[in-house]
Image (cartoon, rainbow, N blue to C red):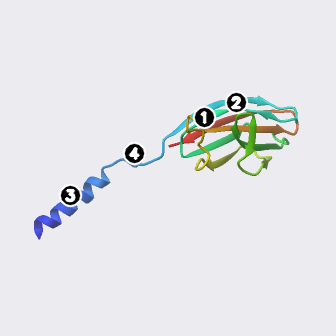
Amino acid sequence: MKKKLQFVLMIGLSALLIPTSALAATTSTLWENDILDKNKGTYTPIVYSNGKSIEICVSKNPKGNTVKLTPYEVSGSKKTPIGSTMSFSTSSACYSKSLSGLKDGKNKKAEIQAKIVSSKSKTVHVKIKHTY
């Protein structure tokens, strides 16, 4: 019984030695750049992801500017919104979406694109990343 208890304690202590970062999801940036939109709608390039989820972040939004972000799944020339348009006037905001059911085609990847509308023709910074 004593050896069994020692074994259980050793397993428990070993589990505590695993860094929590080893259990965290891996994130990588697919595209990042500044976008100047003149209140007409500017699209990011299409990015390809085989990850679990996608995150589109807009930052450096100047005071008084409203940004609208619409995420799309792209198949050939067809763009399908994959969520509601997000509108914000804060300096930054992010949109996250699971890619479950969006990976298709020969490459088995989701093809994602975002439309950015800047109400006052201002430049904002956009980053698209995915997690595994």
Q: Relative to residue 69, is residue 1 depicted above or below?
A: below
Picture coordinates of residue 33, whole percent (x, y): 69, 29
Task: Label 1: state its secondary structure.
Answer: strand
Q: Amino acid at mark 4?
A: Ala
Picture coordinates of residue 73, whole percent (x, y): 69, 42
Numbered badge on residue 10: 3
Q: Amino acid at mark 2?
A: Pro
Picture coordinates of residue 18, whole percent (x, y): 33, 49
Numbered badge on residue 48: 1
- Nearest the eye: 2 or 103: 103
Q: Nearer the viewer, mark 2 or mark 3?
A: 2
Q: Relative to residue 2, is residue 119 depicted above or below?
A: above
Q: Residue under circle 2?
A: 45
Q: Residue furthest bottom?
A: 1
Q: Amino acid at mark 1?
A: Tyr
Mark before the other along the chain sequence, 2 or 3? 3
Q: Residue under circle 4?
A: 22
User: Badges 3 and 4: C-beta atoms under 8 Å apart?
Assistant: no
Label 3 CA crowd tier, 10 Å (few <14, some 14–19, many 20+) = few
Distance of label 2 from label 3 (alpha carbons):
51 Å
Q: Relative to residue 1, is residue 114 depicted above or below?
A: above
